[in-house]
Amino acid sequence: MIKHHLIKTDFGCRCTICRWQWRSIPTSQCPGVPRFARWSDLPTYLKTLDQLSKVGLKPRDKGDPSACLQPKEGKSPRYWLYDQRQAVPLHKRTSVVGESIQQQRAIAAKARQLWEKGDIYTELHRGVVIEAVPQVLEKFIRFKARAKLRGIPGKFSAADIEANVNLPTHLEAVAQAKRFIDQILDTGIPNNIPARKNLHAYLEKWGGCFIRLDESGAGFYLRVSCEPEEKEEQKQEEISIPTFISMDGEWWEVLGVKPDATQVEVKKAYRRLAGLFHPDINKSEEAHDRTVALNRAYEKYRELVRTVAQKT
């Protein structure tokens, strides 16, 4: 509680901090944040600790509220309120023991290693390469997922997505992206969302928007791409499966590139082949073996790149 900062008004005085008005000089102290008298006056984003906890969130700093509910003068605030948009995910308690704990520790150690080195973790899901990008933060390990979607049913066939919420491990970030990708690939980009009724018209005009997935505010930024139509010959060449690529040679032979290929060329080749041979898409007998060979070759290339970077 602090001292009010008062200014004169036509009806008495008003505090610029708690925004409360009086006919005479108040004797109580200021809560230090905007004050509300009724629940109906609260903006939808202001929540109590219990309300945040029910949706799996908590304030970044419990001692730094955004507002308070204080109906009567001279009384202490009944509830401290926090901005839900600034909240962070609530840590989930677990009672599992043994192997599950060891697995969680291994995932946490891998997440820290990726975060410290700045490496991007990738995972293939339904032919889509999902990237878990480590965020540069001072104290907390966080990952944000992004992906490029192609072959979407409906009006928009291609889109780039990026999560607006950072999660503590790369696997959690990828899992969040998978749910959204499944929704988009199964039903297409919806035309009606809670925040916007005619989404397709909006996307045609602006090319992107934000889609919220749940009440916590988590969601994805969506950017539809207007790619020019390719000729039929180019399309056929793009989707043809290269049978001449080796599965047990050097990394560049497995990826079908030259030994002196750039990082962009190598990454593009890997993504293309990984999509072609993914078991969910390619039902041939060798699809699994080729996918394993591709992952092994690409990991070997990344190790070489890291080694060169450390030497320089």
Image (tube, helix red, strand yellow):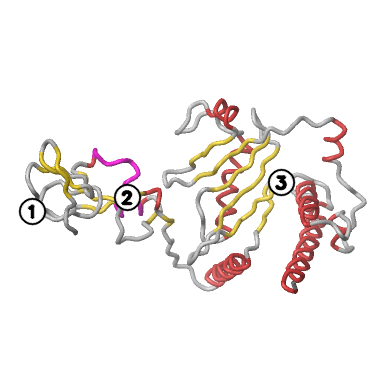
In magenta, the rendered stretch is 40-53
- The kind of secondary structure element at disc 2 is helix
Amino acid at circle 1:
Thr
Q: Would you say 112 lies left or right of 17 here?
A: right
**Is residue 44 a member of the stretch shown in magenta?**
yes
Foreground residue among 253 and 103: 253
Q: CA distance from mark 2 to mark 1?
A: 32 Å
Judging by the rendered image, the residue that carries numbered circle 3 is 127
Which mark is on residue 70?
none
Which disc, if any, is residue 51? 2
Q: Position of residue 189 (x, y in %)?
A: 59, 33
Crowd band around label 1 with a 10 angstrom C-alpha radius: few (<14), some (14–19), many (20+): few
10 on left or right of 83:
left
Is the Cβ of the residue at disc 2 closer than 8 Å to that at disc 1? no
Q: Is residue 296 magenta?
A: no
Q: Residues within 10 Å of mark 3 (few under 14, many from 20)?
A: many
Distance between mark 1 and mark 3 Cα atoms: 67 Å
> Where in the figure is residue 74, as x and y percent of width and height?
10, 52
From the viewer's perspective, is residue 110 above or below residue 78? below
Give SS at disc 3: loop
Question: Which of these two is toward me, 224 or 155?
Answer: 224
For badge 2, the amino acid type reads Gln
- Corner quadrant of residue 155: top right
First reached walking from the N terminus: tag 2 or tag 1: 1
Query: Tag 3 or tag 1, which sits nearer the N-term?
Result: 1
Can you tell which of label 1 and label 3 is closer to the viewer?
Answer: 1
Tag 2 or tag 3, which sits nearer the N-term?
Answer: 2
